[in-house]
Image: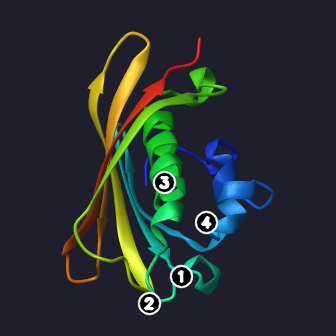
Amino acid sequence: MSNFDELTRPVFFQPGHNAGDLVESTQWKILREDRGKVEVEAHLPSHLLNPRGQLFGGFTGTYVDMISIYTMRTLYSQENRFKWSATVNMRIDYFAPVLGPNFHLTGELIKEGRSTCLISTLFCDSDGNKLVYALTTLRKSD
């Protein structure tokens, strides 16, 4: 792990954030946290499953948004961390169903501009198979 301590963790990795609580992010395991890149092992809660036992596609964006914001947070020092961000655009490509019990999420900075960041999010199963790829544009805070 990098120089971030518990106080700088994204709020959705702590209880009390609606989206984080929905995907049970307090139980995720942070595998890597560097400037512009994060890797997380997540699990698939039963209340997010579709009738086929897969991640319901409508909840995929919640995971993508959270990992994108988390990735963007790594660009800031603790003294200068951002207070908010806004998702401007999100594109999600589905390659294969996301199944439980666990899967990996990787967020990576693609391009940092003056007022926005382009971030990729990749979902992979435990064998490294690519399941979902997303691109998110986030507006940086002032």
Give the CA distance from mark 3 to mark 4: 14 Å
Q: Earlier in the sequence, mark 1 or mark 3?
A: 1
- The kind of residue on which mark 2 rests is Arg
Q: Position of residue 100 (x, y in %)?
A: 43, 86
Up/down of 110 relative to 6, above or below: above
Q: Earlier in the sequence, mark 4 or mark 2?
A: 4
In the image, taking residue 59 as reference, residue 130 lies left or right, namely left
Q: How is the image coloured?
A: rainbow
From the viewer's perspective, is the residue at label 3 or at label 4 nearer? 3
Q: Which quarter of the image is occupied by the C terminus? A: top right
**On the image, numbered disc 2 is attached to which residue?**
52
**On the image, numbered disc 4 is attached to which residue?**
25
**Secondary structure beneath disc 2?**
loop
**On the image, numbered disc 3 is attached to which residue?**
61
Quarter residue 45 falls in:
bottom right
Farthest residue toward the front? 51
From the viewer's perspective, is the residue at label 2 or at label 3 nearer? 2
Tell me what residue is drawn at x 54 percent, y 55 percent.
62
Give the CA distance from mark 1 to mark 3: 14 Å
Q: Number of callouts in the render?
A: 4
Q: Earlier in the sequence, mark 2 or mark 3?
A: 2
**Secondary structure beneath disc 1?**
loop
Give the CA distance from mark 4 to mark 1: 16 Å
Callout 2 touching callout 1 (CB < 8 Å):
yes
